[in-house]
Image (cartoon, helix red, strand yellow):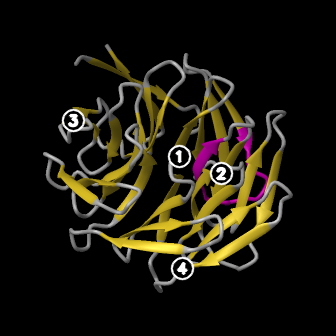
């Protein structure tokens, strides 16, 4: 399979692009944690910035909902942000201080779910704006990325406790321990096969867990690749960033892995998204947005 990789340099110097998502408007939306703004990029590379009201908010993960709104976590400000289709930013302050919200996803009924790394909780924002928090059973599990599963539940990675968590609409939590010790799971996504796929930043593996809790693991060919985020591509494969080895990886349903080097050295790729143009888009800490097109 042939690929072509392009990179778009951002105008704000050292803006710190981190999370990225495909919007309902046909553009890419991304966080810039150092510039304290949300960026919107067309598939042709044209960028529009939106300044986050709270200074030094630490914007990290970002999603686009079925309603067309963009939601993001403000890790340092202890808030969840919402950017409406009209360009207005609304911020929701978490009830508990210093919770460090990180991962975010849209639930099955339109609720917004997020992780609290320091708070050791899963949070939820209802359509009314009311916020609910669920304490996790294991202390210091450090919940990271989060995604809606095909089973009506929400799934998330627990970076420090080395588990994959599942939470129901009623707040009931089940944990599944990974076979590889100290694997450090981070990114997670819903796969085309109805299972959950995730990355192990320390274990140097891609993991797969069925909704029944059966886990498989696949070793990444490059040692110390440091995989970070993962997404389902338009080709029924999973694509992931490797910030340790400066590559974009691809894994098939059969567990076959291919890796593609990023042109810019030390790009530090983090967030990754499947674009409206059929390409794979990713955020580079080196102040660029990357685009990988499948030829």
> Where does the image place residue 50, in percent across and percent down from the top left?
73, 39
The quarter of the image holding the N terminus is top left
Q: Where is residue 277 shown, x and y percent of the image?
A: 51, 18
Seen as rendered, the residue at the extreme bottom is 139
Mark 4 Cα shell of 10 Å, populated few (<14), some (14-19), many (≥20): many
For residue 153, side relative to residue 130 (left or right): left
Q: Going from the N terminus, do you reach mark 3 or mark 4 first?
A: 4
Mark 4 against mark 1, which lies toward the viewer?
A: 4
For residue 4: magenta?
A: no
Q: Quadrant of the C terminus?
A: top left
Residue position marked by numbered label 4 in the rendering? 136
Q: Which residues are magenta?
A: 50-64
Which residue matches tag 2?
Answer: 72
CB under 8 Å between discs 2 and 1 = yes
Residue 84 in picture, x, y percent from top left:
80, 40
Residue 159 position (above or below residue 147): below
Q: Which residue is mark 3?
A: 259
**Residue beneath the point at 28% across and 19% down:** 3
First in sequence: mark 2 vs mark 4? 2
Left or right: residue 60 versus residue 4 is right
Report which residue position mark 1 lands on.
19
Tag 1–tag 3 contact (CB < 8 Å) = no
Q: Earlier in the sequence, mark 1 or mark 3?
A: 1
Q: Secondary structure at mark 2?
A: strand
Q: Secondary structure at mark 1?
A: strand
| In the foreground, 78 or 235 | 235
Mark 2 vs mark 4, CA separation in Å: 22 Å
Q: Nearer the viewer, residue 213 or 85?
A: 213
């Amino acid at each position: 399979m042939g690929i072509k990789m392009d990179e778009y340099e951002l105008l704000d110097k050292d803006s710190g692009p981190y999370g990225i998502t495909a919007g309902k408007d046909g553009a890419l939306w991304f966080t810039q944690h150092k510039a304290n703004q949300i960026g919107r990029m067309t598939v042709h590379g044209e960028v529009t910035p939106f300044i986050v009201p709270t200074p030094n908010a630490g914007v990290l993960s970002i999603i686009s909902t079925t309603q067309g709104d963009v939601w993001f976590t403000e890790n340092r400000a202890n808030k969840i942000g919402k950017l409406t289709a009209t360009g207005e930013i609304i911020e929701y302050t978490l009830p508990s201080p210093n919770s460090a919200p990180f991962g975010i996803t849209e639930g099955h009924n339109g609720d917004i779910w997020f992780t609290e790394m320091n708070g050791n909780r899963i949070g939820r924002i209802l359509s009314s704006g009311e916020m609910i928090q669920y304490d996790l059973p294991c202390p210091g599990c450090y919940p990271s990325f989060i995604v809606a599963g095909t089973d009506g539940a929400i799934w998330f990675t627990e970076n420090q406790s080395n588990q994959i968590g599942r939470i129901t609409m009623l707040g009931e939590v089940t944990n599944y321990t990974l076979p590889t010790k100290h694997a450090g799971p981070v990114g997670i996504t819903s796969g085309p096969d109805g299972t959950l796929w995730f990355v192990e930043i320390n274990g140097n593996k891609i993991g797969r867990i069925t909704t029944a809790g059966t886990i498989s693991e696949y070793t990444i060919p490059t040692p110390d690749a440091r995989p970070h985020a993962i997404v389902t591509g338009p080709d029924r494969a999973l694509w992931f960033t490797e910030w340790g080895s400066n590559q974009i990886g691809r894994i098939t349903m059969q567990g076959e892995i291919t890796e593609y080097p990023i042109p810019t050295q030390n790009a530090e790729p983090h967030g990754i998204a499947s674009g409206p143009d059929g390409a794979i888009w990713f955020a580079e800490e080196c102040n660029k947005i990357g685009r990988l097109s499948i030829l």
